[in-house]
Image (tube, rainbow, N blue to C red):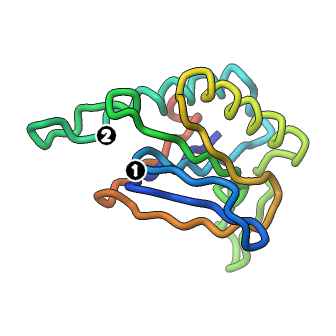
C-alpha cells in the first residue's frame, strides 16, 4: 500500500463537474493498493497516517498531528501510485491491486478513518476525478507499506 499525503489548507474532488468531496485544513491522501495488501497492512498504514506530526506548533515546529489541529481527510483511490516505469516510456500497472481488492481495501480505509477522524471526505473509486488542492508548505510525504510494515 502506498499513501501519498499532502498537507493542505483545502482540497476538493469533482466527478462529472460535481463536487463530491471537500475539506479544509488537513490531509489529502492518494491511496494506492497492490495485490499483496490486506487489512493488517491497512491498519498499520492508517495508524502511521493519523499519527504523523507534520502540522506546526506555536513555535513553528512540525510537532502536531491531524487530531491536534482538528484536521480533515480527503481520501482518493489512485492505482497509478503503482506505476512501473522501468522499461520504456509507457507505465505498466501490473503491481496495482485488482479493482475488486483495491475497492474493498479503499472502503476499509475510509470506514476505519471515519471512526477516528470527524471529517472524512472521499473521491469515487474508478471514476475520472478532478482534484484541486492548496498544498500547505508545500508538504508532501509518501508512505510505502514495504518500508512501514516490512
Residue 129 quadrant: bottom right
Compared with 140, 41 (above or below) is above
Q: Quadrant of the C terminus?
A: top right
Q: Give the mark nearer the N terminus: 2 vs 1.
A: 1
Q: Is residue 125 above or below residue 149?
A: below
Q: Residue at x 77, y 60 (%)?
A: 93
Residue 119 appears in view:
yes
Question: What is the quadrant of residue 82 in the picture?
Answer: bottom right
Disc 1 crowd, CA 10 A, few/some/many (<14, 14-19, 20+): many
Q: Nearer the viewer, residue 30 or 89?
A: 30
Query: Is residue 140 left or right of 1 when viewed as pictured?
Result: left
Residue 54's label in the rendered image is 2
Q: Which mark is residue 145?
A: none
Q: Check disc 2 and report its element: helix, strand or loop.
A: loop
> What is the number of the mark on residue 7?
1
Quarter of the view holding residue 110: top right
| Count of marks placed on residues | 2
User: x and y percent of residue 76 in the render?
Assistant: 65, 51
Marks 2 and 1, Cα distance to the nearest angstrom? 8 Å
Q: Are marks 2 and 1 in contact (CB under 8 Å)?
A: yes
Residue at horizontal 81 percent and vertical 62 percent from the top: 127
- Residue farthest along the left direction in this orientation: 59
Give the left or right position of residue 56, taking residue 74 as reference. Answer: left
Task: Pinpoint residue 103: horizontal percent, then vertical percent.
Answer: 82, 42
Nearer-the-camera pick, 47 or 20: 20
Q: Residue at x 90, y 42 (%)?
A: 100
Q: Quadrant of the N terminus?
A: top right
Q: Is residue 150 visible?
A: no
Disc 2 crowd rating (10 Å Cα; few below 14, some 14-19, many 20+) is some
Residue 21 or residue 98, whichever sits in front: 21
Amino acid at each position: 500500500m502506498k499513501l501519498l499525503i499532502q498537507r493542505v489548507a483545502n482540497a476538493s474532488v469533482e466527478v462529472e463537474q460535481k463536487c463530491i468531496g471537500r475539506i479544509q485544513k488537513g490531509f489529502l491522501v492518494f491511496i494506492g493498493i497492490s495485490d499483496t495488501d490486506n487489512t493488517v497492512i491497512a491498519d498499520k498504514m492508517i495508524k502511521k497516517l493519523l499519527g504523523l506530526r507534520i502540522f506546526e506548533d506555536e513555535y513553528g515546529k512540525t510537532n502536531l498531528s491531524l487530531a491536534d489541529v482538528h484536521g480533515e481527510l480527503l481520501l482518493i483511490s489512485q492505482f497509478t501510485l503503482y506505476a512501473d516505469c522501468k522499461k520504456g516510456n509507457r507505465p505498466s500497472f501490473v503491481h496495482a491491486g485488482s479493482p475488486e481488492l483495491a475497492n474493498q481495501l479503499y472502503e476499509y480505509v475510509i470506514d476505519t478513518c471515519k471512526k477516528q477522524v470527524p471529517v472524512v471526505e472521499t473521491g469515487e473509486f474508478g471514476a475520472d476525478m478532478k482534484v484541486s488542492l492548496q498544498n500547505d508548505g508545500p508538504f508532501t510525504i509518501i508512505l510505502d507499506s514495504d518500508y512501514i510494515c516490512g
